[in-house]
Image (cartoon, grey):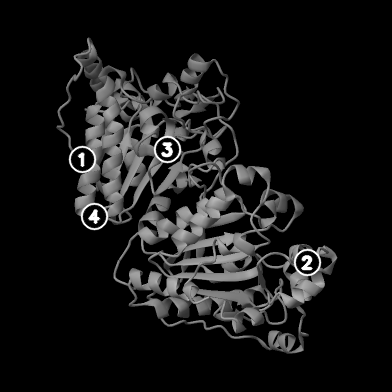
Amino acid sequence: MEKRWQSITRRFPSNLHNKTEEHLLEKEENPSTEAAPVENPTVKCPKCGKLVNKKRVVKRKYICYECEGYFRVKTNNRIRMVADPGSFEEWFTDMPVSNPLDYKGYEEKLAAAREKTGLNEAFTVGKCTVFGEPIVLGVCDSRFMMASMGHALGEKVTAAIERATEEKLPVFLFCCSGGARMQEGIISLMQMAKTSAAIKRHGEAGLLYSTILTDPTTGGVTASFAMLGDVIMAEPGALIGFAGPRVIKQTIGQDLPEGFQTAEFLLEHGFVDGIVERKNLKKTIYFLIKTHQSTGDGSWADFKEDQNPFMLDEVLKEQAMKAPLRSAWEKVKAVRQVERPSALDYMNHIFDSFVEAHGDRLFADDPAIIGGIGMLDGQPVTVIADIKGKTMKECQMRNFGMPKPEGYRKALRLMKQAEKFGRPIVSFVNTSGAFCGIEAEERGQGEAIARNLLEMSDLKVPVLCILIGEGGSGGALATAVGNEVWMLENATYSILSPEGFASILWKDSARAKEASEVMNITAADLKRLGVIEEIIPEFGGAGEKTEEAIGRYMKERIRIFLMKQNGKSGEQLAKERYERFRAF
């Protein structure tokens, strides 16, 4: 299994697909329509314009081997890509279709679409298995009136989600659409509210709803069931937006910049979790099924006995024995070193795999905070982590680990998702503080931090927070409201930086070293004050030689922490967390 969803950076034009592609796929599924067999049939790629071998394109799951451009895919082929062979059982095959506004010529247009596609409507849905796991699978087909949403499509989506709720099944929908079906007017518009309401009830039942956005996904479908997934994936280069390029151009006369409204654009702006290539799609769906199965029985860990318990080797023992005691100021300087291991370094030794999710679904994807699902000895855990960066380029990209509001909102979105599906949360904290730039204030930095404190206090799953470097002020606390809080031996946790402390109280930031000694910011200080529960040894100092040992030690302690939570209800966990902070 791939450890990460693959995101590509190519920018595809919004007119990626055309009738040539539809003709190719129609002939592929209906070879009888071809006048005569051709030994090496070719087709023109709609992206690069080259003539490519049709058989090779089909074998590559309808992807051009010259430019990696994606062709649109018909319903039956979509189902074959995902469902176990022979497992798809279609639902609602005889759903009636009417002309609610008596629009002239609508019946004839529907009849023509049925004859062309062999479909009763633009949406096909049913039950199938993916590597043996049952799901509800739905597919929109753009060949049928651009998969515009009329009352029949909305009814099939809604009825399928309602049935999935009754049968306690996850739902995966392949979305594409030109928007609302104009011939049905206001009745089409009402489908947006109807489908969204069904998704709300499905979610309240603790079930997974996931969408895969394909080219194009626009209009009322984008503004309803397509963008409401617990997990939203997108195909590379897909056009995704509310108002399509032509509508924008004709309405306000504005030309769109290159790459606007692509899947990559939405990933950057925080609206999709990841971009998934077709070759990885089935196993990604299986991964999501397995990691979003909530038992709801108060069992937070079911580990077998550790076959490889952590053992400190003799070199590290000797190194730890010889390590000199560090002053508070020396620890401040140590945790600011760019060479100090990051959460990602430790995670390589803690989790079997980690799949990152992106975006706050509001504005952007903040790389200063990462989040996703880690597998801890086969069990899913939601992971949140501050990341500063190791090179200058990465540090700038991650804003030196100083999150913006969208970073905190992304973390909260993933933590609430963990609560819904009964996953424990592990948060790795390492930030000098929240970013204090103009744009952060414009987007509500204070509100974002406050909202995290409010919501984390009442999460109904175990929350463990580990300070691995700097713990700077409210920016650190925003992801550190846990049932237990731990610190690495040389980490720091403070109301603000020593420089800021000295500047405010003594009007002299040059006295930072002196300030660090009176602020009580070290792990030993905070253990004495009851602010943290455990100190994680660094075996002489966190670095390249010790990161594996520190990571393996943390893994063993995390296992023990989770096993201690077994038998506790969500309400009890929230109550214990409340009482922990109430005591200060």
Circles 3 and 1: CB distance less than 8 Å?
no
Q: CA distance from mark 4 to mark 1?
A: 14 Å
Q: Earlier in the sequence, mark 3 or mark 4?
A: 4
Left or right? Give the position of 165 relative to 447: left
Q: CA distance from mark 3 to mark 1?
A: 21 Å
Q: Which residue is mark 2?
A: 502
Residue 176's x, y, as percent? 38, 32
Which residue occupies 43% across, 24% down? 21
Q: CA distance from mark 1 to mark 2?
A: 63 Å
Residue 168 bears which disc, if any?
4
Q: Which residue is mark 1?
A: 159
Q: Earlier in the sequence, mark 3 or mark 2?
A: 3
Residue 213 bears which disc, if any?
3
For label 1, the SS is helix
Q: Earlier in the sequence, mark 2 or mark 4?
A: 4
Q: CA distance from mark 3 to mark 4?
A: 23 Å
Residue 499's x, y, as percent? 77, 64
For label 3, the SS is strand
Any part of residue 329 in sight: yes
Residue 103's x, y, as percent? 22, 13
Task: Count neighbours of disc 2 (C-alpha within 10 A) and say few if under 14, some if 14 to 19, many if 20 or more.
Answer: many
- Image vertical order of residue 84 relative to residue 419, above or below: above
